[in-house]
Image (cartoon, rainbow, N blue to C red):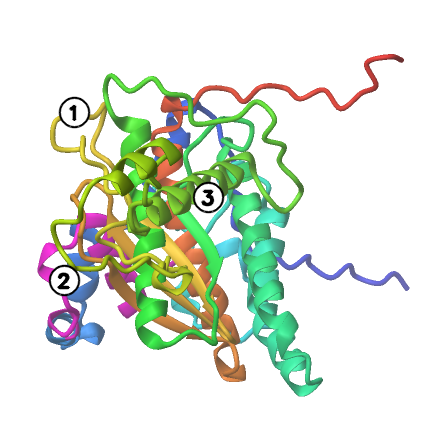
């Protein structure tokens, strides 16, 4: 007796992975448009979100003067449970992570913002998973009484994600000017000093963008000996160099003028003259000279030529991820505005909340991908980086 063959069940169609096919696709906008956002807010299940979004935006200082990118970042953070930010075919990669289905999107005409631009989906999803696991790693260090290592671990993990973004965006081997900074803040400083330090670093990063885009300024920004590492791109080396130079200029401006001592001949000549006054001049002591370690934003070597020089294009919005103990603060500033411009504070990412590990990783990735989007859009402005020969010249 022959057995009847069971009819094959049709397999569910698998979402097709997006691949880069042309140079035009590299510049495709990965951020939802105003029309798409309006359609999302008009849906019946999202009734009332417009009112909540408007009320929340009104609470932020300087929100009325935000650049379009800053406003869109705020809307992404506020509507993160409704806006799709991940490709639909990443569902399998994150099956062990609790995520709302609304995060995933399958449209190829409008790909999500946290996605691979180069078609290397495994590297993209793995890099995001490391950010999601960062909360667990920080909590483990706290429970192991190793808090001193936490800022270094957080900074290293975020910089690794930025390095992935530069590779995926295709600008890693270019002399690009970063629009995102990752830095640690001294937790032992008082609140005013921390605020001044954050503002100074954001102003300096904005000043770097203006220096790069200014017409007629051909001063080279890069050194030939800038050597990138697996965890630090050449662009990040440029930011550190520019920060050091700006710090020296700031301290020189904040320091009091030096006192010129008279020569011996002049002293002898003055001693022969009769004194006309009995007023004594106090000699300044060493303790009277005070140079602040953290300069305030106003005297921090402002770019005085910004008003008189045009730019090749509109200076972009720059972002900052600042690490304070176990938290990461997300800041932004419009570099096209003169100092002192408004530094916008968006969100405080608490890496000790174990139930927020997924959202913590998504928020950090969102800021990095916003910065990547602008760099890819203007990738033609950057020249190829010089090839550094590490070989033995005597070989």
Is residue 77 rendered magenta in the image?
yes
Q: Residue at x 52, y 81 (%)?
A: 352
- Is residue 288 something that shows in the picture? yes
**The N terminus, quarter of image:** bottom right
Q: Which mark is residue 244?
A: 3
Name the element at disc 2.
helix
Is residue 10 rendered magenta in the image?
no
* Residue beneath disc 2: 63
Q: Residue at x 29, y 66 (%)?
A: 346
Residue 84: quadrant of the picture: bottom left
Judging depth in this view, the residue of 172 and 49 nearest the camera is 172
* Above or below: residue 299 compared with residue 266: below
Is 107 on the left-hand or right-hand side of 2?
left
**The C terminus, quarter of image:** top right
Mark 3–mark 1 Cα distance, whole angstroms, equals 26 Å
* Residue beneath disc 1: 310
Q: Residue at x 42, y 64 (%)?
A: 363
Q: Residue at x 43, y 44 (%)?
A: 243
Is there a contact, CB below 8 Å, between mark 3 and mark 2?
no
Q: Earlier in the sequence, mark 3 or mark 2?
A: 2
Residue 10: quadrant of the picture: bottom right
Q: Earlier in the sequence, mark 1 or mark 2?
A: 2
| Magenta part of the chain | 56-85
């Amino acid at each position: 007796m022959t057995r009847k063959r069971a009819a094959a069940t049709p397999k569910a169609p698998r979402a097709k992975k997006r691949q880069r096919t042309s140079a035009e696709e590299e510049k495709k906008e990965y951020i939802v448009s105003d029309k798409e956002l309006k359609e999302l807010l008009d849906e019946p299940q999202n009734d009332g979100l417009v009112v909540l979004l408007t009320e929340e935006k009104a609470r932020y200082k300087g929100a009325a003067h935000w650049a379009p990118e800053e406003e869109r970042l705020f809307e992404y953070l506020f509507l993160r449970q409704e806006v799709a930010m991940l490709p639909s075919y990443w569902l399998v990669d994150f099956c062990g992570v609790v995520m709302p289905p609304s995060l995933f999107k399958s449209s190829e005409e409008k790909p999500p913002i946290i996605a691979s631009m180069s078609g290397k989906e495994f590297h993209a999803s793995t890099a995001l998973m490391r950010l999601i696991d960062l909360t667990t790693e920080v909590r483990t260090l706290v429970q192991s009484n190793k808090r001193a290592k936490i800022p270094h671990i957080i900074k290293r993990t975020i910089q690794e994600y930025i390095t992935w973004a530069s590779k995926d965006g295709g600008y890693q081997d270019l002399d690009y000017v970063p629009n995102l900074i990752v830095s640690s803040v001294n937790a032992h400083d008082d609140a005013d000093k921390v605020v001044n330090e954050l503002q100074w670093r954001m102003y300096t990063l904005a000043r770097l963008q203006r220096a790069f885009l200014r017409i007629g300024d051909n001063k080279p920004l890069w050194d030939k000996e800038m050597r990138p590492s697996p965890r630090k791109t050449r662009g990040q080396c440029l930011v550190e160099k520019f920060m050091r130079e700006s710090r020296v200029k700031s301290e020189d401006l904040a320091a009091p003028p030096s006192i010129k001592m008279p020569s011996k001949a002049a002293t002898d000549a003055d001693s022969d003259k009769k004194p006309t006054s009995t007023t004594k001049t106090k000699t300044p002591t060493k303790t009277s000279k005070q140079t602040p370690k953290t300069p305030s934003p106003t005297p921090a070597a402002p770019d005085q030529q910004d008003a008189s020089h045009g730019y090749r294009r509109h200076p972009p919005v720059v972002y900052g991820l600042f690490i304070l103990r176990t938290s990461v603060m997300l800041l932004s500033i419009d570099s096209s505005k003169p100092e002192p411009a408004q530094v916008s504070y968006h969100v405080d990412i608490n890496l000790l909340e174990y139930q927020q590990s997924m959202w913590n990783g998504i928020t950090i990735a969102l800021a990095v991908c916003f910065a990547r989007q602008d760099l890819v859009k203007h990738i033609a402005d950057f020249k190829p980086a010089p090839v550094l020969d590490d070989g033995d010249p005597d070989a």
